[in-house]
Amino acid sequence: MNVKTKTTLMIALFFCSMLAGCAGDDEKPSLVQTGSSTVLPLAVVWAEDYQDADVSVSGGGSSHGLNALLNGETDLADASRIMKNKDYGKFDDCDDTAVDESTGSTSTPCNGVLPVKWVVAFDVLATIVHPDNDWATSMNFTQLYSIFTDDNPAAYWDEVPGMESTAPHELIEIYAPDEASGTFDFFFESVIEDWGKDSQVAGTRLESGDGVYHPSADDNVIMTAIKNNPYAIGYLGFAYVKENPGSVGLVSLDGGSGPVEPSLSTVADYPMARPLHVYTDAYADNRGDVEGYISFALSEEGQQVVDEVGYVRVAMVNSELLESQKSMLND
């Protein structure tokens, strides 16, 4: 290499180090997002639309996502339930009493991770049956308890309280989320008194081992199974119902004030409406990149995705919560 060529190369390298646009400087940061199958449809679209990072998205359930966050294996943990002490309890060096189980928040780190909860949308948890089912179009919590718990469960539809003379003598089959799912937790928190406490009054039909409860981590599998089984019942997030109109029958739920059909317009009155979360790490080295993504999810563009997917915008349920979260991001 002659002196002139070497000088030219040195000048080029100097300007490359000083100016944007050289190879590597324009590379986007990479983020990993995993967890709840309910949040997954949102995460997939957000990841596609977000321009400031390459986001790798996967499901696996809320417990999987929260565990991955505490293990340092993900940047964003999707959860359809709040964090609980049982999540900290999976790690020997973490305080399994540190999480406020009324809010899902904590000020105590675990494995060097300090979880921060963000509410990104609201969901209606729908109980679903076969579209030809005309005897279980409206149910109450007593009836759900008799089907889904191991406390003297109804084996046949005509054994469900209040359906003795209207339902067929056919075996009930349950297709629903597995134990790693936040949807599983939320459903049974609504159905079983003192769920998750020492005083819990019953177990789940899955725990009974009678083979009636067929668990799946894939909500599409649940939808297909119920669509093809006239005597099946299950539950899942409303977005999957919206994606498959007419495929299943929706069960109105009576929480004591009369039956309410699950829909986006009834979220304020429906007995099993819930927030959807993304948890991040306040101590993360890439906190700015992560919070940039959260800021996008809470922006007008990100909340339009919530509408499109079939969930409810944060502002429609709690506008103050939306503004307080945006303020946290700006601090």
Image (cartoon, grey):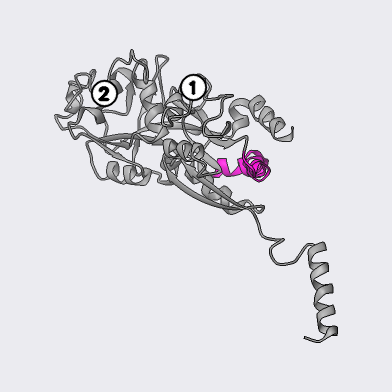
Q: Residue at 67% across / 52% down in the picture?
A: 52
Q: Kindly identify which residue carries mark 1.
A: 269
Of 37 and 229, nearer the camera is: 37
Residue 302 inside the magenta-drawn segment: yes
Q: Residue furthest bottom?
A: 2
Quarter of the image where the N terminus is located: bottom right
Q: Residue furthest left?
A: 169
Q: Residue at 17% across / 24% down in the picture?
A: 158
Q: CA distance from mark 2 to mark 1?
A: 25 Å
Percent of width and height locating residue 219: 37, 43
Q: How many marks?
A: 2
Vertical order, 104 against 42 (above or below): above
Q: Name the kind of residue labelled 2 in the image.
A: Thr
The segment highlighted magenta reads 284-308
Determine whether, in the image, residue 1 is placed left or right of residue 58: right
Residue 149's mark? 2
In the figure, residue 86 lies in which quadrant?
top left
Percent of width and height locating residue 209: 19, 31
Q: Name the kind of residue labelled 1 in the image.
A: Asp
Vertical order, 93 against 201 (above or below): below
At mark 1, the secondary structure is loop
Q: Residue at 44% across / 45% down in the picture?
A: 59
Determine whether, in the image, residue 229 is placed left or right of residue 322: left
Q: Which secondary structure class fits the magenta region best?
A: helix
In the figure, residue 126 lies in which quadrant?
top left
Residue 19 visible in the picture = no
Determine whether, in the image, residue 195 is placed left or right of residue 316: left
Of 49 and 130, nearer the camera is: 49
The mark that comes first in sequence, 2 or 1, is 2
In the figure, residue 175 lies in which quadrant?
top left
Percent of width and height locating residue 57: 50, 49
